[in-house]
Image: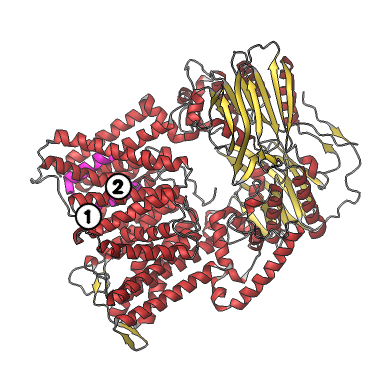
Amino acid sequence: MNYAFHLLIYVSVYIVLALSLDLVVGYLGRLSLAHAGFVAIGAYVYALATLTLQWTFVPALLLAVAVAIVCSLALSLPSWRFRGDFFIFITLAVGALIHGIVQNWSAPGYEVGSLANLTNGPFGIAGIPQTDIFGIKLDTIESKCALSLVLAGVCASIMYRLTHSPWGRLLKCLRDDELVLRGIGKNVRLIKLQAFSFSCGLAAVGGVIYASYVSYIDPSAASLDESILLLCMICVGGSGNFRGPMVGAIVLVLLPEVLRFTPIPQSVAANVRLLVYGLLLLVVVHFRPQGIAGEYRIE
Amino acid sequence: MPIIETMEKQPLHTDVRPECRLLMRATGIAKAFGGQPVLTGVDLELHEGQVVLLQGPNGSGKTTLLNILTGHLVPDAGRIDLFTNGCREVFHFPRHWWQDLNPLDRFLPERLASKGVGRSWQDTRLFNSLKLLDNIAVAKQQHPGEKPFNLFFHPGRVLAMERQLQAVCGERLVQLGLGGRDSSSGDKVSLGQAKRVAIARAVEAGARILFLDEPLAGLDAPGIADVVALLRDLVDQHRVTLVIIEHVGSIVHVQQLADTVWDLDGGKLTTRPNHCIETMTKHSLASQWRIDRLFHEFKLVRSEVLPRGARLDVYRKNGAANSELILEVENLVIRRNRRPVIGWGRTGDGAMLGLNLTLRSGDLAVLQAPNGWGKTTLMDCLAGLLPANTGKIKMRGQAVTSLLPWERSLIGLYYLRSDTRGFPSLSVRNARRVNGRRESIRMRCSEDRHKYGELSGGQKRSFQINCLGNSRAALYILDEPFVGLDGMEMSSALNKIVKLTEFNGQCLLVAIPHISIEHEPC
Amino acid sequence: MQIILIGTISGLTLAVIGLGFSLVYLPTRTFHIAMAGVYTLVPYLALDLVNRGASWWIAVPVCLLAAVLVSVLCELGNHRRLERKHASPGAHIISSLGIYIVTVQIVALVWGNETQVLRTDIDKIFHLGSVMITRAQLVAGVFSLLLLITFYCWLRFSNLGLRFRALADNPTEFSLRGYNVDAYRLLAFGTSGFLACAASLLIAYDVGFDPYGGLHIVLLGVVAVIIGGRLSFLGPVLGGLLLGILRSQAVWYFSARWQDVICFLLLALFLYVRPNGICGTATRLEAEE
């Protein structure tokens, strides 16, 4: 039964991440391979805030979101000037940069969270304190599951409100024809800034939920593999609408569970999982560009 | 010798529009592309309620001027004053580098659009993921729903504005004759209707000055009538200032509206009131004359009028014998974005009527059509760059619809495109080697070592015609081959092209812009 | 002086990788991320062959052949199909990413996830004046230089090279003149595979290899291309040399861990000031047509 809660938490985390990435990929029409970096930023900031500053859950969450939004400038500023595959490459570089920073900002002998050893390098930050919301400590898996579901619900409704609104309409126009949108007087740069801010902010929320559940965060959360997984969810599930990313998140989180029942040894399970992701990407691009349930075809 | 025909007649408007508020003034606008000057000091003024016709020969810089005045292009020198919002805004060019650092003070399309300078595009460009209603609704300025803060903290305001907007835009669509179609997307309505929605969108965005880039391109007669009616309505009811660029063939339809004419030629602009009609500019008259002169060697075999104002004339050289069938086109329909570019009307059972064309060796076919008709689309499809939706294309009896462009080229098709980009980084000598066969032909020895990309437009065009003259193909397809050539170059080009028909087994299909003369009755 | 020499050598290998990327990007405008997959595959194949008793004289050509084959398959099976359907650049890049993932995971499944080395002996050290250089670095430098020189001579002086440059300039016009564009694209991908294989073997011989370093190196190669000028064939060399020297300076003055950050900062600077790179014109790439 605990295992079901565990899966539910993972599913809700990835729904948040997939929806937030879809804001940029499906609505704005820009592919981003840096999303995992922002998840990691959220997780690391939360970890440091609770561990070294002894903040409770909500202030730490808000700080994580704020830092992620500021860092989203690394994506929104280039998006003003570059588009298409050039922009994808830049997101690749930004993702690699974030990964490099969290991997390397460490110095042996110094305390974790100090300026010299902010992220503790490849060892990650362990022992993140129990989730503390306004004095209530959440120590059972059921309570943590409830928290993650609530947060996921809040994020999903924020996304829904954003996309089914005049602002969301602007995003679709931007995807269709940016020049014409500028010609009718809309401030396209501001729209891109807002879109990336929301996307990275919500990604940070996902990272916070993850960090508070697992109590440990390490640089692999910012790796390219994670970004590719998120992109896979969007491609396979579909983008440009509400259902698609959720379907993608559910399918790709449950896939490794399905693999458990196949006679594949545990040591290679991770490789097989990634192999399946790669194959899924190829299959989707060639045969079903709109994914399982999406609206916007990546073709 | 060039002739200008002017017919003095009564002024078109009995009530001369009173001198109204000045909205825009530009002085000394200059722009050069890669060393070639396009505009050399343009001065103009726009008053409220004015309707201006901007005309000039191909390549004179009309679109460049349009792009500059709407903020899409930064000029090299000059000054633009805007008075649309009651207060005065000045832009000096060239801009200093520190001015560009200020994020609030940039010369951008959205800045000018928010000050009431709007435009329409030649290829319509509606937002295809949005319904028609939303296309107009999105143009609303200062919508509270476009700020995410309001979405979460003032949802009531957003809802109220949205409801009001839906009602207003629904009414607009009804006025445009599209009531009941508000849920269609942009690609399901006819081109004329789409163009009207696009203009309505620009007006909804608050444009006080509206620049229209060839608003009648690609339209049939009812479409033209609808757009002209909309423009007239904008002028009479809403006092919008219009600047219309229209190609010389379709100018006739908008001439009634205009009270001023801007002639752009040689980089300079002259303003004159629209009293007398100049039916053709010097340049196009010259090209018409030269083409006519050479065709006295040829006999007109058949002439076909095609829908939407095009004409296909097929000539044969006097005494030509061989008549092998080279090109057969059967029921060709080409769509772009689901709208048919080549393909007209519907027969009784709902199928689309396509283009039919046959060319035999020794034929010289001239396709005259206005801008936006689809000449380039047709030729790209014949060459294999675009897929055809329905129809068959056969060359010398062999079906080519599944062949790639290079395969078609190998069986005898030579396609000369209208863009002269060529191979910019190669030297001229190498470009010749890649293009053709024999290296012994020398165009101009001194230029051989220059990069192809550094040649002027006219030189590139002459180079291409030279390569054309030295090739051996069965079917030549030439897309507007004379654009950018001056008088002497044009005769030489024409001679080369005509020479191509001297060898047996060739036929040509040449597209030229619409240059027939339309006379207004006195 | 030592640092500059080491930097130049690593810059030359980066230039080879960047050139491999450019060879596909310029004629086809495809981001050939799958080249990182080829890069990863090659040293494992070489080690396998050597362990089975083959000599280097057999292993290296086999690897080159395999690399060319895999790259050509990318084009035949993937990009050509998408090209026929007029797919967007996004589709090309996602599919290339998919091929990369599949290749790397197959390598990891067959040969394992650990870092390996191609040579087991202590490297010989040469002294050139006051500078010390290992044999592996010398080999890498010399071979990279030879490859680059050969390639540029071919590009500049041969007929095939001329046509290749024409294809890179204007693929549509090239096909209209009767050249088999598909065949030339295969040539582009194949040569790219060849260069990736060479660079991979040289670097693997020097520092070892693992399944996950491929993308990182190719990323650096692409940064070199962008800095040097992505619209020119000469770009990768200029960018590679600049990047290589800067990275080695960074290692000397800061530490090895920050060389990537410095790399990306340099990229950011170039993208802001001179997006078309050293070789390109100083125009600004506005996000509009």
Q: Nearer the viewer, residue B390 or A117?
A: B390
Going by the numbered disc 2, the residue's amino acid type is Ala
Helix, strand, or loop for circle 2? helix
Q: Chain of mark 1?
A: C
State the residue position of label 1.
C252
| Type of the residue with mark 1 | Trp
Residues A166 and B401: in front is B401
Q: Residue at x 87, y 34 (%)?
A: B7
Chain part drawn in magenta: C194-223
What residue sits 62% from the left and 37% below the top?
A: B333
Q: In which chain is the residue bearing label 2?
A: C
Residue closest to the far front: B349
Quadrant of the snapshot with the C terminus of chain B: top right
Q: Quadrant of residue B237?
A: bottom right
- Name above or below for residue C208 compared with residue A98: above
Left or right of C129 on screen, residue B468: right
